[in-house]
Image (cartoon, rainbow, N blue to C red):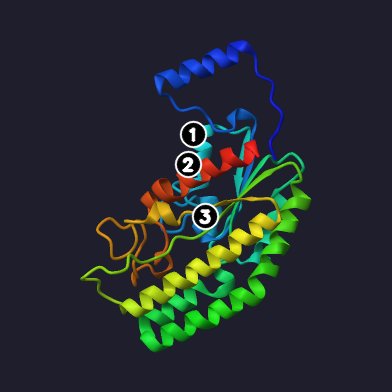
Amino acid sequence: MARTRTATLLAGLVAGAVVALGLATPAQAAGEHYVSLGDSYASGVGAGSYTAESGGCKRSLNAFPQLWANTNAPASYRSVACSGAKTGDVVNNQLSALSATTTLVSVVIGGNDVGFANIMTTCALAGTNACLAAVTNAENLARTSLPGWLDNVYNGIKNRAPNADVVVLGYPTFYQLGTPICLGLSEQSRAKINSGINLANDIISAAAARHGFTFGDVRPRFIGHQLCSGDKWLHAVNFADIGVSYHPTANGQSGGYLPVFRSAATLAAKS
């Protein structure tokens, strides 16, 4: 939802000068009241530098919402994103952070509802056939139930923050396929996992569109930086710190999620 802003001639001249100098301008300037909702991809699990106040939610100073706030200096910023969150957790525990004064919301949610973590554990430990079956079961659940669960979240956001621009972000596909040497899962398993993530993104994007929200697709940004690539922005299985497995690194947050959110937030404000 675009908010009407008056612009003086002086402001226009200053903006023109900034563009001419090639300097960055804050996307929504200092008037934004921004709230970040969602799961571990929004809180920044895997990116390190977790805040003490966030406890087990593991909100990182390197997560894209914090990075955006650092650059844009909004009037207020709060992240209530939490590791392990499902759609019901957002509805019950996170929406209270929103109000009629909220002007910008980001949300990443849905992966835990269809069992991302359990799927990846099965695929890593139980072999190809079990992996394919686990992803197929998750796809069936996503088709039948995820749209309604997302509608609950998005309706709640609209009710609590009726004046906000809302950006819904999806998930990166995990694997670069066709690489000659890639240890671990079979190519068949990797392709099936990517297919399941693509389905989840399609469902999330469609739900966002139903509610008039802007969808930020992070998959193109992660091309060339997936697992099995030479410059990965995702953690592989890490048995020493299992929780970070398949989550974006700090580079994945800054190079993958942040530019997509920045562009989507700008688009949402103009729509």
The local secondary structure at tag 2 comes to helix
Q: Where residue 210 appears, x then y in whole percent?
A: 70, 57
Q: Residues within 10 Å of mark 3 (few under 14, many from 20)?
A: many
Residues at discs 1 and 3 in contact (Cβ within 8 Å): no
Please report contact status of discs 2 and 1: CB closer than 8 Å, yes or no: yes
Residue 82 coordinates in the image, percent (x, y) = 57, 59
Q: Position of residue 146 (x, y in %)?
A: 64, 70
Q: Quadrant of the C terminus?
A: top right
Three-letter residue code for mark 2? Leu
Q: Position of residue 150 (x, y in %)?
A: 67, 64
Give, as a three-letter code, the residue at label 3: Ser
Near-viewer residue (11 or 80): 11
Residue 92 visible in the picture: no
- Going by the numbered disc 1, the residue's amino acid type is Thr
In the image, is residue 180 above or below residue 226? below
Please name whichever residue, 177 or 117, is drawn nearer the observer in this view of the structure: 177
Residue 24 in sight in this render: yes
Image point (53%, 38%), residue name: 69
Residue 167 is labelled as none
In the image, residue 239 sits, relative to residue 41, either above or below, namely below
Q: CA distance from mark 2 to mark 1?
A: 6 Å
Q: Would you name the residue on which mark 1 appears?
A: 71
What residue is shown with label 2?
67
Task: Measure the C-alpha gap from mark 1 to mark 3.
Answer: 18 Å
Which residue corresponds to mark 3?
43
Q: Secondary structure at mark 3?
A: helix
Q: Is residue 240 above or below residue 71?
A: below
Secondary structure of the residue carrying numbered label 1:
helix
Residue occupying the point 48% across, 68% down: 197
